[in-house]
Amino acid sequence: MTSRPALLPRFSPIRIPLLLAALLALSACSSQDASQGNAVPAADPVAGAAVDSTEPGVEAGQASTPAAAVEPGPIVPPTGPAPVAGTDYVVIAGGQPFAPGSGKIEVVEVFGYTCPACARFEPLLDAWKARQPADVQVVPVAAPFGGYWEPYAKAYYAADTLGLVDETHDAMFRAIHVERSLPVQPVPSSEQLAAFYAQHGADAERFADTMSSFAVNAKMKRASQFLTRSGVDSTPTLVVNGQYRITGNSFEEHLRIAEHLIARERAANGAPPAEDDAPVPPVTGD
């Protein structure tokens, strides 16, 4: 995924269309896609899986780590150069965590099930999340951008309400982008989505009712408020502790920048740094 496509080097006329297609497949999914009536294309089950070279052989929505709980990783120093405000991340004025009070450093992943870039990012994020120390909490936030984003965001929050996310998250990405058993357009009905979740242990009628419940509507509103105050208008986007919105140019860069910002927040909280960790540079304005 690239938030902003890089300048193209010189290529032969034959290779340029292929490169453009790859860049398009990796670009972030914008909140304007649905409002302008642009369908987000599903990833090709064969070729699409190879577009993102950051982890060859991992298909969209295919978890790279087991779903079972894993032991937290150690605190290690971040690698690479320190990120630059305004280039690698944006300082969010008056920003607040999505779920304050956990006592942990929050990393929000804003995603959309219909977003091909999110489907490719998910396996990398899963592997990265499994390596994080106990003081880091990764929180998924489904973006309710409207249009075809809306029913899938409601489905996520209904699954969250019913305790079904762990069993269905990767399967939903696969259903849309690999199996193509769920549509992007026309927008799926609550009954269609409930039938999908029924394959994973849900009661279809209860699930459809939950999608229109007060609890899910409240979660949708909360997500919208967080996206607005954090300036998020595309997916996937990482927001660290409600303070920093990451704007790196690749999946790997997003995660590397997140590690630097996590270290910064850890130092600000007075926690001891990792061994051999260099001093964390001060926050600069954007």
Image (cartoon, helix red, strand yellow):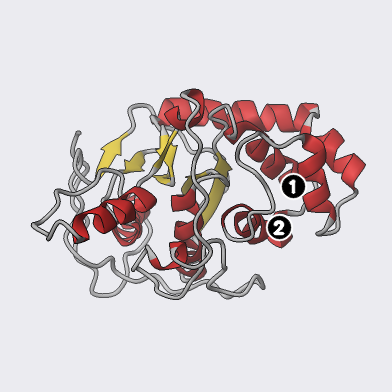
Report whether 85 appears left or right of 37.
left
Q: Residue 225's x, y, as percent?
A: 53, 25
Residue under numbered circle 2: 168
Report whether 140 appears left or right of 154.
left
Residue under numbered circle 1: 159
| Residue 269 shows up from this direction | no
Q: Nearer the viewer, residue 24 or 247?
A: 24
Q: Residue 4's x, y, as percent?
A: 25, 43
Residue drawn at x 20%, y 65% as measured from the top left: 80
The part of the image, by quadrant, that contains residue 233 is top left
Q: CA distance from mark 1 to mark 2?
A: 8 Å
Q: Residue 31's x, y, as percent?
A: 45, 31
Mark 2 lies on a secondary structure that is: helix
Is the C-beta separation of discs 1 and 2 under 8 Å?
yes
Query: Label 1 crowding class (10 Å Cα cut-off): few <14, some 14-19, many 20+?
Result: many
Mark 1 lies on a secondary structure that is: helix
Amino acid under disc 1: Ala
Residue drawn at x 36%, y 53% as measured from the top left: 26
Report whether 240 appears left or right of 213.
left
Residue drawn at x 34%, y 59% as measured from the top left: 259
The part of the image, by quadrant, that contains residue 89 is top left
Q: Nearer the viewer, residue 97 or 180?
A: 180
| Residue 151 shows up from this direction | yes
Residue drawn at x 61%, y 36% as measured from the top left: 185
Query: Label 2 crowding class (10 Å Cα cut-off): few <14, some 14-19, many 20+?
Result: some
Reply above or below: 147 against 87. above
Q: Nearer the viewer, residue 26 or 205?
A: 26
Report whether 165 appears left or right of 269.
right
